[in-house]
Image (spheres, rainbow, N blue to C red):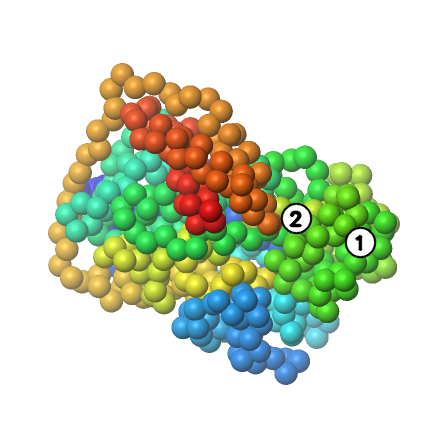
Amino acid sequence: MNNFYDVIVVGAGVAGLYTALDLPEKCRVLVLAKREAELCNSKLAQGGVAAVYKPVDDDTITLHTNDTFVAGGFKNNPDSVRVLVTEAAAEIEHILDLGVDFDKDENGELDRTLEGGHSRRRIFHHKDSTGAEVTRAIREAVLAADNITLMDNALMCRMKQVNGGFAFDVLHDGEHTTYTSRFAVLATGGIGRVYGYTTNSAIATGDGIAAAYDMGATITNLSLVQFHPTAYHDSSRECFLISESVRGEGAYLLNCNKERFMDRYDDREELAPRDVVSHSIMLESKRTQSEEFYLDIRYKGEEYLHERFPMIFEFLLTQGINMAEDLIPIFPCQHYLMGGINVDTNSRTDIPGLYAVGECSHTGVHGNNRLASNSLLEALVFGHKAADDIASKADDGFEAFTYEFTQPENAEHIPTGLRTEIRHIMQQAYFVIPDKQKAVEGFERVSEIKKLLDKEYIIDRDYVEARSLATVAYIILKEII
């Protein structure tokens, strides 16, 4: 029974690691990292964690709530928002205790920055690499926990409900092994790799969402995709993000004529929420017949910029750009997912024993558009809620069990080019503003690909990711046509 665990967590970003860490020490926990343990979208998060913690500047939970609703177009789940903002302070306290090194001001107090959509400075940050710092501290605590096993390069190939629990077919070091558990937590992150261009890392292929969909879990609002307005504009598939906090600290958006233009579209100008800014850029692009757009924060000076945004500053230097002297070329890019596996305020799906946390889940907290820096907060708050709910059921007398997945015999590899074709379809059909005609055409082809992948193929990374992407694209396009 060594392959049986009380809880198996799929995903090793902040949501998955924090859930595992908050589980009782009596729970035997396995965390599956799809590739190397440090490769996750959480690590890429630059801006920070939004929270009303020891508030200053007249900030209140009510203001944070209102900002979240405004950014989400008032389509947010009120209960989820209440949980998010009221429990934020406790989670900030917890991660500080874990050793997260947030920046401090000249008085030694925790520094707070401003980002688009926020009415107050409430973003706690570690320079411009907050996600990496938060992930580091939580991962170190997980690695020190005797009850948690963190397995890297462990690809979840299949997942099935068995005996009131769950069985996982895991590809690790080239071999398939079945692991079983009483509870399962999906923390597999976003779906960015379904697009031609994304800020997401290579692991973001929607594997958890596809697995939950196959088991019959409710998937909600998967077409609520967020396009970040300021990705560094080049031809890379994985686009480098120019953080929201750059605009929060005073950067201007310029069009191809090097003119500010946001006042044409929104009174909040550069500090409007992400969806508003992205839409504005697309409208301005149509007006000017150009995709040349820039961020300008040169007036802040090199000393300040290098100190405040060291990662962005150094990256841009590798591209031949000094952000203290040069304009930064930007354009919208796929960034985040507001929809996902539907859960309640305890992160429970409608399948007993199955939980979903982080970006792959749909708490409803973000509404139609996520407010900047509420993502890491959501991972912390609802990861903790999942752990608490599991803890309340951990002594139910469940008996360990075994299961074996069979592998297809004499199977072939999937046809080449399917993932590339899916990305091209999604980029054409739904980039910031949906193209209904291309969405209809794309849905027909994606449906064919999805059906094709129902046949038996060699179950490897190519197959798993292609099937996940086809499932995700199918659900998104079905929602918007």
Q: Report whether 480 appears left or right of 309.
A: left
Indicate whether 16 appears above or below 65.
above
Q: Position of residue 436 (x, y in %)?
A: 53, 45
Q: Report whether 387 appears left or right of 409.
A: right
Residue carrying label 1: 254
Q: From the image, which quarter does the N terminus lie in?
A: top left
Kindly state the secondary structure of the residue where label 1 is placed.
strand
Indicate whether 161 appears above or below 79.
above
Which of the pair 311/460 is nearer the observer? Answer: 460
Q: Residue at x 40, y 30 (%)?
A: 449
Q: Residue at x 27, y 58 (%)?
A: 350
Gap between marks 1 and 2, in whole Å? Answer: 14 Å
Q: How many marks?
A: 2
Q: Residue at x 85, y 51 (%)?
A: 258
Of the image marks 1 and 2, the number of the one nearer the N terminus = 1
Q: Position of residue 93 (x, y in %)?
A: 49, 71
**Residue 401 seen from this side:** yes
Q: Dot 2: few (<14), some (14–19), or many (≥20) neighbours within 10 Å?
A: many
Which residue is most to the bottom? 58
Residue carrying label 2: 332
Which residue is most to the front? 437
Quarter-of-image position of residue 403 = top left
Query: Of the residues shown, which amino acid type is indicated by label 1?
Result: Leu
Which of the pair 304/438 is nearer the observer? Answer: 438
Q: Position of residue 113 (x, y in %)?
A: 67, 67
Q: Residue at x 54, y 80 (%)?
A: 62
Kindly state the secondary structure of the residue where label 2 is placed.
strand
Which of the pair 155/259 is nearer the observer? Answer: 259
